Amino acid sequence: MVQHISLVQKIKRMLKNDLKNPHMLIETIGKSVLGEDIECIVISEDPMKYGISYCEKQYKEITSKHPPSTSTNKDMKLPILINASIHGTEPVGAKVVLELVNYLMENESGDAKELLKHFIFICVPMANPDGLKKGTRYNENGFDLNRDFIFQTQPETKAIVNLIKTCNPVVLFDLHGYVSKFKDKIGLIEPCTQPHNPHYEYDLYIKWALPMAEKMENNLLFSRNNFFSNRYKNMKGVCIPFRDLSSGWDDYAPFCTSSYAILHGAIGCTIEAPSSGNDSIPWMLEAILGACQFLMDNKQEFLSDYLLFFQRGIHLNHPIHPNNFFPTCYIFTETNNTSYKVYRLVNHLINNGVKVDITLEDTTVEERFVPKGSFVARMGQAKSVLANTLLWEGEKEPKGKFSDICVWSLPLLWGVHSITTSTPLLAETKEISNKDLPAQENKTSHDKRIGIIYDGGLYRKQSHAGLKSCLNKLGFTVKEVHPRSLINKQSLEDIDVLIYNGFEHLFYTKERVKPIYQKHVLESKQQQKRCVKTLDYFLSKGGKFIAIGAGPAKITKSIFHLTNCTINTGKRNNNAIIHVDYLDHPINMGYSSKDIGFVYRPVWFSNTDGVEVIARISSDQDALIAGNWSDFENAKGYPVIIKEKSRDVVLIGLEICHRGQPEHLFNILLNAIYS
């Protein structure tokens, strides 16, 4: 892969050399997995006065019980957050930040001076410094950070989330590349196609997002003669998905930076550069400057709607949403078995800027007992759209073409029972902070030696990253086993349990994948046969094999020949939270007989007479809790976890560790390892 070490070094030199600039301040907002600083550049008239702390104070003022009127805020500095190179294979964003810094610093007497009257520019040039150095889309842990903004499993994501929560930008630009949907409309600037996240105050968002994008487009057309290549000189416009596409570029799932920022009141806008060539840098810069001009021209009205977003939340008045879409509050009551899960959820909510109270007395709500010490997330708060997004169950069969998973309920996937109510909670409460919560539980160390099938980056992903994260959280030390290493019979000698959760293509031969990915798969049919022999030998010596998800289940049958069951799979993008009937078995220890499961590219098993059935998809009418699973009726009642009787092979159809997110399901893997 192309490495960008020189770019990283250039950015670091720039940060060091410009420390004395009176309009610029550098702050470290976090660390990457490998310990690299995640730097934030603040540019304003006076960054010591108009910086991150100013933005935080400003937010508290406009969300207070007596906010200042819009007219008194006409001189308010508008924070604009620019997030760059969250994908390490897209260095254009980092380069654009460098150009923006130069533009603002070198034109102090002209347009830049005018910009600094109105804006505070908060720029993160390297949101993924480890990935940028190595030229990988993902971070050092193998995670796509731009799919991590609800669960926030990675340190880089947490740093950006904290910055968004603290600064509350009016606009967030997330800089990416490289996309061109049309020959003459090059690049891409959001807003998105449908389906949109149903929580958005979409009337306020689209009112500004669409004309801002079109102003950015106009600025690019006006400047096109300044570009070098004919492709840029001859462009007729930009692809604005909301306007130009029918579907497929949606903002339903708030896993990405820009769609997550909308929940904080920002106009979230992903910008995709048309190409990796040099013209892409001034192209992006001109787009951003066009947006700034648009905001200056419409500042008073724009600011009024920005304040209205938070006032709607405070007064629980969401005119575009149906009645009862927002409950009055969510209530979480801890028990001896779930207290650490409740604390985990409450801590997460507070870290995201959601206010949480604790009850100071016993009470009842809708005839349900709520003991003293329960936690309450009221929806009558400035960021109610964020709070409800994190906490709701989700929709059944939402319509549209999705670019990512469409279910993410934190209470369900983290194993926290929540009570929702549409009536006011009358008990006395007080707001709490993170400091009021006890420390999280410590990890337990384990003696089992675990090996996992390693995905080095097939299809620009490390599909085993969620599995590895899950095992680390459970306290296991993990050995990564490349598929090709299995041709050696001795490769599993120091492993007790081998686990496979990833693409089935890892055990295909190289002619079945594109040349760029061939190094991640097997060389030949002969290597496939040797892998089968290694696995058979491993199992004969008392080893255990666990396959998680659709791809590994298919390979377990078609190549490894370790099961005779029929493997049934749904569509690749189908995903859902479902009810599962967990039978009486050690693998299900700690789960109720009817508990939740999560599927992504669903898989279920039939012709299971020769195996032990451990869990089934519920056949109840309410078995589908939320999600998009087109052929769900075909899977109801069928096994979703099975175990071979003749050898220690377990097939788990649920995605119990997808992206390290569904923590409530992690113990299924722990139980399977030891059962």
Image (cartoon, rainbow, N blue to C red):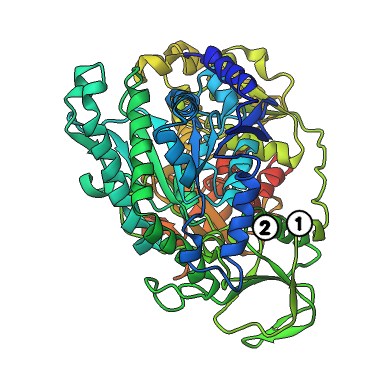
* Residue at screen point 47% across, 42% down: 565
Residue 152 x/y as whole percent: 60, 45
As drawn, the label of residue 474 is none
* Residue at screen point 36% across, 33% down: 272
Q: Nearer the viewer, residue 271 or 323?
A: 271
Q: Nearer the viewer, residue 380 or 207?
A: 207
The answer to which image quadrant residue 362 occupies is bottom right
The answer to which image quadrant residue 114 occupies is top left
53 lies left or right of 86 = right
Q: Is residue 3 above or below residue 307?
A: above
* Residue at screen point 21% across, 23% down: 225
Q: Is residue 601 above or below residue 134?
A: below
Q: Nearer the viewer, residue 43 or 321?
A: 43
Residue 317 x/y as whole percent: 46, 75
Q: CA distance from mark 1 to mark 2?
A: 7 Å
Amino acid type shown at disc 1: Asn
Residue 447 x/y as whole percent: 82, 33
Q: Which of the two discs, 1 and 2, labels the residue nearer the N terminus? A: 2
Label 1–label 2 contact, CB within 8 A = yes
CA neighbours of label 1 inside 10 A, class few (<14), some (14 to 19), many (20+) = some
83 lies left or right of 360 = left
Residue bearing mark 1:
434
Residue bearing mark 2:
350
